[in-house]
Image: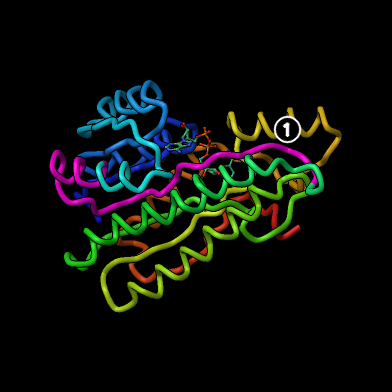
Amino acid sequence: MKGDVALVTGGGGDIGRAIAVALARTAPAVAIVDIDEAAAAATARLVEAAGAKALAVRADVSSAAETAAFVETIEQKLGPIGIFANNAGIEGVVAPLHEYPDDTFDRLMQVNVKGVFLGLKYVLAKMRPRGRGAIVNTASTSAIRGRAGLAGYVASKHAVLGLTRTAALEVTGTKIRVNAILPGPIESRMIQELEDQARERSVTPRRSGGAPYGKPENIADVVAFLASDAAAHVNGAAWVVDGGMTVA
Ligand SMILES: NC(=O)c1ccc[n+]([C@@H]2O[C@H](COP(=O)([O-])OP(=O)(O)OC[C@H]3O[C@@H](n4cnc5c(N)ncnc54)[C@H](O)[C@@H]3O)[C@@H](O)[C@H]2O)c1
């Protein structure tokens, strides 16, 4: 996949920024989509500093119209998307199920589930006729285990794994691959926010098994691998990157 144009959603955030910079090592151009325009622009500057062309686009991944539009714009301006890091996501709140706010649950489904679905839908519509491409959906170790206080987030990440496996089956026999990356806790704004909320509410969502937290670059390096030809036979995988947390 060397030489392919890359797209990273949630590219203004901690993990998306690291993915965009990692992909800039081999991609001629990287598009960064984020609902936070300034954050996307900041990542675009880092991508350019890493030697690739960059395009920052403000969009909400939970909107079908906006997703269809940014896929078109990126292909027009940069060329065919060969690598897609379907990464935008939100954390919601920390609360026990019997108090979990309905509107937070709904928004998690819209962004983390429908957003990933729409990204797959509109990018695969472009990739399928070309018969090649690599997609990496950002799930979480919350896709394969429960976490007290995080009902909406955990449900949404389990769904990302279901979408990944379905998409992977649909592209079998082509040179398109769809995988999920499952980060454990990463030193980031998102984990800091969840831990602050958990402390306030005396819930313990963290189950690190003593494993140290990772860095965004630990995730980005594995996404770059999954997007590369070195992973040519990896399709439908749930690739855990957690320092061993989930085996504890
Ligand atoms: N941080 C962790 O420890 C961790 C662990 C496992 C999985 N993840 C997942 O990794 C991904 C990236 O998380 P992060 O830690 O970089 O968080 P982050 O909050 O730093 O980044 C997420 C980015 O997504 C953007 N975004 C949110 N809603 C959007 C929308 N509707 N449309 C477009 N962009 C939107 C945000 O503006 C932000 O820039 C998420 O899917 C998250 O669930 C994170």
Which of the two residues, 73 or 182, is positioned nearer the viewer here? Answer: 73
Please identify the quadrant where the C terminus is shown. Answer: bottom right
Q: Is residue 227 above or below residue 163?
A: above
Indicate left or right for 58 with 109 as reference: left
Which of the two residues, 41 or 152, is positioned nearer the viewer here? Answer: 152
Residue drawn at the location 51% of the way across and 37% of the way down: 216
Q: Residues within 10 Å of mark 1 (few under 14, many from 20)?
A: some
Give the tally of numbered discs. Answer: 1
State the SS at label 1: helix
Residue drawn at the location 40% of the way across and 70% of the way down: 168
Residue 220 is inside the magenta segment: no
Magenta segment: 70-96
Q: Position of residue 160 (x, y in %)?
A: 52, 58
Residue 198 found in image quarter? top right
Q: Amino acid at mark 1?
A: Glu
Mark 1, residue position: 195
Q: Position of residue 89 (x, y in %)?
A: 51, 42
